[in-house]
Image (spheres, rainbow, N blue to C red):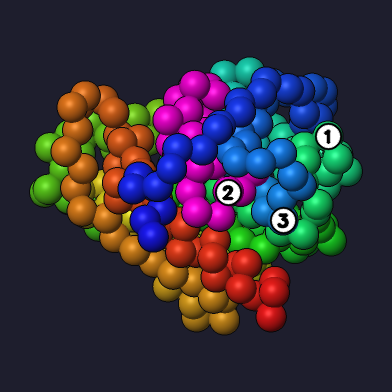
Amino acid sequence: MNAVGDMPERALKVRDLEVAGATGPLPARLYAAGPAAKRDMLVVFYHGGGFDSGDLDEADDFLRSLAECDHLPLVLAPSYTLATVSPFPAAVEDAHAVLQWAKKNKTKLGWNGKLLVTAGIEAGANLAAVCALMSRDRGGPALAGQILVMPMLDPALSTGSMRQLTQCSDREKAATICAEAYRGYLPHAADRSHPYAAPLHSSRLKNLAPALILSAEDDPLRDEAELYGAKLINAGICTTVRRMAPADLQDPNGRNECACKWQAMGEIANFLARLEGRQGA
Protein backbone atom coordinates (compact mmCIF):
# COMPACT_ATOMS: atom_id res chain seq x y z
CA MET A 1 0.00 0.00 0.00
CA ASN A 2 1.34 3.43 -0.83
CA ALA A 3 1.95 5.99 1.88
CA VAL A 4 -0.25 8.50 0.08
CA GLY A 5 -2.47 8.29 -2.95
CA ASP A 6 -4.13 5.13 -4.32
CA MET A 7 -6.32 4.84 -1.21
CA PRO A 8 -9.69 6.15 -0.12
CA GLU A 9 -9.57 9.79 0.88
CA ARG A 10 -9.62 10.21 4.65
CA ALA A 11 -11.39 13.02 6.39
CA LEU A 12 -8.72 15.38 7.65
CA LYS A 13 -9.40 17.77 10.49
CA VAL A 14 -7.08 20.70 11.08
CA ARG A 15 -7.44 22.64 14.30
CA ASP A 16 -5.70 25.77 15.52
CA LEU A 17 -4.77 25.79 19.19
CA GLU A 18 -2.29 27.19 21.68
CA VAL A 19 0.55 25.25 23.27
CA ALA A 20 2.92 26.25 26.05
CA GLY A 21 6.38 27.43 25.05
CA ALA A 22 9.25 28.14 27.39
CA THR A 23 8.03 31.64 28.29
CA GLY A 24 4.41 31.73 27.18
CA PRO A 25 1.72 30.45 24.80
CA LEU A 26 2.53 29.69 21.18
CA PRO A 27 0.19 29.26 18.20
CA ALA A 28 0.05 25.69 16.91
CA ARG A 29 -1.91 23.52 14.50
CA LEU A 30 -3.14 19.96 15.02
CA TYR A 31 -3.73 17.61 12.07
CA ALA A 32 -5.83 14.47 12.51
CA ALA A 33 -7.14 12.15 9.79
CA GLY A 34 -9.45 9.20 10.04
CA PRO A 35 -11.73 8.17 12.91
CA ALA A 36 -11.89 10.28 16.05
CA ALA A 37 -10.08 7.87 18.34
CA LYS A 38 -7.04 8.29 20.55
CA ARG A 39 -3.85 7.67 18.59
CA ASP A 40 -0.72 5.86 19.66
CA MET A 41 1.58 8.26 17.82
CA LEU A 42 2.06 12.01 17.98
CA VAL A 43 4.52 13.66 15.60
CA VAL A 44 5.61 17.15 16.64
CA PHE A 45 6.87 18.96 13.55
CA TYR A 46 8.91 22.18 13.59
CA HIS A 47 8.73 24.40 10.51
CA GLY A 48 11.73 25.66 8.56
CA GLY A 49 12.74 29.20 7.78
CA GLY A 50 16.36 29.50 8.90
CA PHE A 51 15.48 30.32 12.53
CA ASP A 52 14.51 33.87 11.58
CA SER A 53 11.39 33.33 9.45
CA GLY A 54 8.78 30.72 8.56
CA ASP A 55 5.37 30.02 10.02
CA LEU A 56 2.69 27.35 10.38
CA ASP A 57 1.53 27.77 6.78
CA GLU A 58 4.94 26.96 5.31
CA ALA A 59 4.72 23.17 5.62
CA ASP A 60 0.93 22.84 5.58
CA ASP A 61 0.70 20.68 2.44
CA PHE A 62 3.40 18.32 3.70
CA LEU A 63 1.78 18.03 7.14
CA ARG A 64 -1.59 17.21 5.62
CA SER A 65 0.03 14.37 3.70
CA LEU A 66 1.83 13.16 6.81
CA ALA A 67 -1.37 13.06 8.84
CA GLU A 68 -3.05 11.06 6.06
CA CYS A 69 -0.30 8.45 5.65
CA ASP A 70 -0.94 4.78 6.40
CA HIS A 71 -0.34 5.07 10.14
CA LEU A 72 -2.58 8.10 10.71
CA PRO A 73 -0.38 9.80 13.28
CA LEU A 74 -1.55 12.91 15.01
CA VAL A 75 0.63 15.77 13.82
CA LEU A 76 1.22 18.83 15.98
CA ALA A 77 2.93 21.80 14.33
CA PRO A 78 3.93 24.45 16.87
CA SER A 79 5.45 27.83 16.23
CA TYR A 80 8.53 28.89 18.17
CA THR A 81 10.37 32.09 19.02
CA LEU A 82 12.23 33.39 15.98
CA ALA A 83 15.76 34.73 16.22
CA THR A 84 14.51 38.18 15.22
CA VAL A 85 12.66 38.25 18.54
CA SER A 86 15.14 36.37 20.73
CA PRO A 87 18.19 34.36 19.60
CA PHE A 88 19.45 30.98 20.83
CA PRO A 89 18.40 29.24 23.02
CA ALA A 90 14.85 30.64 22.84
CA ALA A 91 13.74 28.45 19.90
CA VAL A 92 15.09 25.18 21.31
CA GLU A 93 13.66 25.91 24.74
CA ASP A 94 10.27 26.49 23.11
CA ALA A 95 10.62 23.31 21.08
CA HIS A 96 11.33 21.17 24.14
CA ALA A 97 8.64 22.91 26.21
CA VAL A 98 6.08 21.96 23.56
CA LEU A 99 7.00 18.28 23.99
CA GLN A 100 6.48 18.58 27.74
CA TRP A 101 3.15 20.33 27.18
CA ALA A 102 2.03 17.62 24.75
CA LYS A 103 2.81 14.89 27.27
CA LYS A 104 0.74 16.67 29.92
CA ASN A 105 -2.17 17.41 27.57
CA LYS A 106 -2.70 14.04 25.90
CA THR A 107 -6.48 14.12 26.30
CA LYS A 108 -6.75 17.56 24.72
CA LEU A 109 -4.82 16.30 21.70
CA GLY A 110 -6.54 12.92 21.37
CA TRP A 111 -3.28 11.02 21.97
CA ASN A 112 -2.73 8.14 24.40
CA GLY A 113 0.88 9.10 25.12
CA LYS A 114 2.57 5.96 23.79
CA LEU A 115 4.76 7.19 20.92
CA LEU A 116 6.21 10.70 20.65
CA VAL A 117 8.26 11.65 17.58
CA THR A 118 10.04 14.91 16.82
CA ALA A 119 10.34 16.04 13.22
CA GLY A 120 11.26 19.08 11.19
CA ILE A 121 12.76 20.51 8.05
CA GLU A 122 15.96 22.59 7.79
CA ALA A 123 16.06 24.86 10.89
CA GLY A 124 13.09 22.94 12.25
CA ALA A 125 15.04 19.71 11.84
CA ASN A 126 17.81 21.27 13.93
CA LEU A 127 15.23 21.82 16.68
CA ALA A 128 13.94 18.26 16.31
CA ALA A 129 17.47 16.85 16.64
CA VAL A 130 18.24 19.08 19.60
CA CYS A 131 15.01 18.04 21.31
CA ALA A 132 16.28 14.47 21.24
CA LEU A 133 19.43 15.63 23.06
CA MET A 134 17.45 17.74 25.54
CA SER A 135 14.95 14.98 26.29
CA ARG A 136 17.81 12.62 27.04
CA ASP A 137 19.67 15.16 29.16
CA ARG A 138 16.62 16.41 31.06
CA GLY A 139 14.94 13.11 31.74
CA GLY A 140 12.16 13.34 29.20
CA PRO A 141 9.76 13.31 27.70
CA ALA A 142 10.83 10.00 26.20
CA LEU A 143 10.98 10.00 22.40
CA ALA A 144 10.20 7.09 20.11
CA GLY A 145 11.95 8.65 17.11
CA GLN A 146 13.26 11.72 15.31
CA ILE A 147 12.73 12.67 11.66
CA LEU A 148 15.23 15.16 10.24
CA VAL A 149 14.52 16.47 6.73
CA MET A 150 17.41 18.40 5.13
CA PRO A 151 18.58 19.49 8.59
CA MET A 152 20.70 22.53 9.44
CA LEU A 153 23.22 21.06 11.90
CA ASP A 154 26.52 22.87 11.28
CA PRO A 155 26.81 26.59 12.08
CA ALA A 156 30.40 26.47 10.80
CA LEU A 157 29.09 25.72 7.28
CA SER A 158 32.16 23.53 6.90
CA THR A 159 30.98 20.57 4.82
CA GLY A 160 31.89 19.89 1.23
CA SER A 161 28.35 20.19 -0.10
CA MET A 162 27.95 23.62 1.52
CA ARG A 163 31.23 24.87 0.07
CA GLN A 164 31.38 23.30 -3.40
CA LEU A 165 28.20 21.50 -4.43
CA THR A 166 28.14 21.96 -8.19
CA GLN A 167 24.67 20.41 -8.71
CA CYS A 168 23.01 23.22 -6.77
CA SER A 169 22.45 26.17 -9.10
CA ASP A 170 21.97 28.60 -6.21
CA ARG A 171 24.57 27.14 -3.82
CA GLU A 172 26.21 30.50 -3.13
CA LYS A 173 22.84 32.08 -2.41
CA ALA A 174 21.89 29.20 -0.11
CA ALA A 175 25.22 29.38 1.73
CA THR A 176 24.80 33.13 2.19
CA ILE A 177 21.28 32.66 3.53
CA CYS A 178 22.47 29.98 5.96
CA ALA A 179 25.33 32.16 7.16
CA GLU A 180 22.98 35.11 7.75
CA ALA A 181 20.52 32.86 9.54
CA TYR A 182 23.17 31.55 11.91
CA ARG A 183 24.49 35.05 12.58
CA GLY A 184 21.03 36.04 13.74
CA TYR A 185 20.35 32.85 15.68
CA LEU A 186 23.81 32.56 17.24
CA PRO A 187 25.09 36.12 17.71
CA HIS A 188 27.56 34.96 20.39
CA ALA A 189 30.45 33.03 18.89
CA ALA A 190 30.71 30.70 21.88
CA ASP A 191 27.21 29.38 21.21
CA ARG A 192 28.23 28.04 17.81
CA SER A 193 29.86 25.03 19.42
CA HIS A 194 27.05 24.35 21.89
CA PRO A 195 25.54 20.90 21.23
CA TYR A 196 22.04 22.39 21.45
CA ALA A 197 22.98 24.71 18.56
CA ALA A 198 25.36 22.50 16.56
CA PRO A 199 24.30 18.85 16.96
CA LEU A 200 26.76 17.76 14.26
CA HIS A 201 29.66 18.68 16.52
CA SER A 202 28.30 17.10 19.69
CA SER A 203 30.51 14.42 21.25
CA ARG A 204 27.59 12.94 23.23
CA LEU A 205 25.22 11.18 20.87
CA LYS A 206 24.48 7.96 22.75
CA ASN A 207 21.08 6.99 24.15
CA LEU A 208 19.10 8.99 21.62
CA ALA A 209 15.87 8.08 19.87
CA PRO A 210 16.02 6.19 16.54
CA ALA A 211 16.42 8.55 13.60
CA LEU A 212 15.36 8.96 10.00
CA ILE A 213 17.52 11.48 8.16
CA LEU A 214 16.58 12.64 4.68
CA SER A 215 19.11 14.55 2.61
CA ALA A 216 18.80 15.76 -0.98
CA GLU A 217 21.22 15.25 -3.85
CA ASP A 218 21.33 18.91 -4.85
CA ASP A 219 21.10 20.45 -1.36
CA PRO A 220 24.04 22.31 0.23
CA LEU A 221 22.85 20.85 3.56
CA ARG A 222 23.32 17.32 2.22
CA ASP A 223 26.69 16.45 3.73
CA GLU A 224 25.94 17.67 7.25
CA ALA A 225 22.78 15.56 7.26
CA GLU A 226 24.65 12.46 6.17
CA LEU A 227 27.60 13.08 8.49
CA TYR A 228 25.21 13.38 11.42
CA GLY A 229 23.60 10.11 10.40
CA ALA A 230 27.01 8.43 10.36
CA LYS A 231 27.82 9.83 13.81
CA LEU A 232 24.52 8.54 15.21
CA ILE A 233 25.19 5.10 13.74
CA ASN A 234 28.68 5.09 15.27
CA ALA A 235 27.12 6.00 18.62
CA GLY A 236 24.86 2.95 18.40
CA ILE A 237 21.66 4.78 17.45
CA CYS A 238 19.31 2.97 15.05
CA THR A 239 19.49 5.38 12.12
CA THR A 240 18.26 5.36 8.53
CA VAL A 241 19.82 7.85 6.10
CA ARG A 242 18.28 8.38 2.68
CA ARG A 243 19.38 10.76 -0.07
CA MET A 244 16.49 12.08 -2.14
CA ALA A 245 16.82 12.81 -5.83
CA PRO A 246 16.65 16.47 -6.88
CA ALA A 247 13.12 17.81 -6.80
CA ASP A 248 11.53 19.31 -9.90
CA LEU A 249 10.63 22.67 -8.41
CA GLN A 250 7.94 24.76 -10.07
CA ASP A 251 8.91 27.62 -7.78
CA PRO A 252 12.67 28.21 -7.58
CA ASN A 253 12.21 29.37 -3.99
CA GLY A 254 10.18 26.30 -3.02
CA ARG A 255 12.92 24.23 -1.43
CA ASN A 256 10.46 22.54 0.93
CA GLU A 257 9.07 20.75 -2.09
CA CYS A 258 12.18 18.57 -1.78
CA ALA A 259 10.41 17.08 1.22
CA CYS A 260 7.08 16.67 -0.55
CA LYS A 261 5.00 13.53 -0.30
CA TRP A 262 6.27 12.13 -3.59
CA GLN A 263 9.80 11.57 -2.30
CA ALA A 264 9.87 11.72 1.48
CA MET A 265 6.53 10.39 2.60
CA GLY A 266 7.20 6.76 1.74
CA GLU A 267 10.41 6.81 3.78
CA ILE A 268 8.64 8.49 6.68
CA ALA A 269 5.74 6.03 6.57
CA ASN A 270 8.18 3.10 6.68
CA PHE A 271 10.03 4.66 9.59
CA LEU A 272 6.80 5.20 11.55
CA ALA A 273 5.84 1.58 10.90
CA ARG A 274 9.14 0.42 12.39
CA LEU A 275 8.55 2.56 15.46
CA GLU A 276 5.10 1.02 15.88
CA GLY A 277 6.63 -2.42 15.46
CA ARG A 278 9.11 -1.76 18.26
CA GLN A 279 6.33 -0.52 20.51
CA GLY A 280 4.27 -3.65 19.84
CA ALA A 281 7.17 -6.09 20.24
Question: Dot 2 corresponds to which residue?
Answer: 72
State whether the magenta stretch is mostly helix, strand or loop. loop
Residue under the point 34% across and 30% down: 177
Q: How many marks?
A: 3
Residue 70 in sight here: yes
Q: Front-most of 234 and 29?
A: 29
Where disc 1 sits, the SS reads helix
User: Dot 3, crowdedness within 10 Å: few (<14), some or many (≥20)?
Assistant: some
For marks 2 and 3, give the CA distance.
Answer: 9 Å
Name the residue furthest front. 8
User: Dot 2, crowdedness within 10 Å: few (<14), some or many (≥20)?
Assistant: many
Residue type at mark 2 is: Leu
Question: Dot 1 corresponds to which residue?
Answer: 108
For marks 1 and 3, give the CA distance.
Answer: 14 Å
> Which of the two labelled residues, at mark 1 and mark 2, occupies the earlier sequence position?
2
Q: Are marks 1 and 3 in contact (CB under 8 Å)?
A: no
Residue under the point 47% across and 57% down: 269
> Which of the two labelled residues, at mark 2 and mark 3, occupies the earlier sequence position?
3
Q: Which mark is residue 62?
A: none
Question: Residue 247: x, y in percent?
Answer: 21, 43
The quadrant of the image that shows the C terminus is: bottom right
- Left or right of residue 94, residue 216 in this image: left
- Left or right of residue 61, residue 32 in this image: right
Magenta residue span: 46-74
Question: Residue 205: x, y in percent?
Answer: 61, 70
Q: Which mark is residue 40?
A: 3
Question: Residue 248: x, y in percent?
Answer: 16, 38
Residue under the point 82% across and 23% down: 24
Give the foreground label among 1 and 2: 2
- Asked if the stretch drawn in magenta spans residue 71, the answer is yes
